[in-house]
Amino acid sequence: MNETLATIVILAGIAVALYFAAARNPLRKCPRCNGAGTLPSVIPGRYRVCPRCTRRGEVKAWGGKD
Ligand SMILES: [Zn+2]
């Protein structure tokens, strides 16, 4: 086995591991609102919908835009 092939095998293994990790846990707690789904408004006592997760409190774990 030469070095190039070994590198490809290692990278493929990492890719598969990430794929299965994402498949098992496709959502994670929204980092913007910390899972609350809302953010404090400029008006005290009021909240606005979190623009990152649109109130769900969760976002896709691996690079999803929504
Ligand atoms: Zn959020």
Image: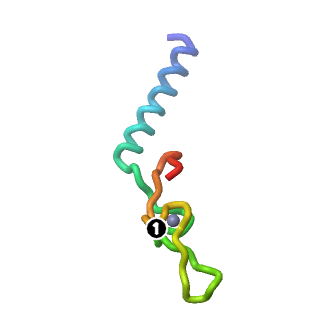
| In the foreground, 57 or 9 | 57
**Residue 42 located left or right of residue 19:** right
* Residue lying at 51% horizontally and 27% vertically, measured from the top left: 11
| In the foreground, 1 or 31 | 31
Name the spot of residue 9 as percent of width and height, x first. 48, 22
Q: Is residue 11 above or below residue 50?
A: above
Q: Does the residue tagged 1 have its C-beta within 8 Å of any atom of ligand 1?
A: yes
Name the residue type under label 1: Arg
Considering every residue shown, the one lying at the far left of the view is 24
Name the spot of residue 7 as percent of width and height, x first. 55, 21
Q: How is the image coloured?
A: rainbow
Considering every residue shown, the one lying at the far top of the view is 1
Q: Is residue 3 above or below residue 30?
A: above
Q: How many marks?
A: 1
Look at the numbered disc 1 and give the secondary structure of its residue.
Answer: loop
**Residue 58 located left or right of residue 39:** left
* Residue lying at 44% horizontally and 29% vertically, measured from the top left: 13
Name the spot of residue 10 as percent of width and height, x first. 50, 26
Q: Is residue 10 above or below residue 4?
A: below
- Residue position marked by numbered label 1 in the rendering: 55
Q: Tell me if mark 1 has few (under 14), some (14-19) or many (20+) residues whose alpha carbon lies within 10 angstroms of its own.
A: some
* Residue lying at 37% horizontally and 39% vertically, measured from the top left: 20
**Residue 23 located left or right of residue 7:** left
Considering every residue shown, the one lying at the far bottom of the view is 45
* Residue lying at 62% horizontally and 86% vertically, measured from the top left: 43
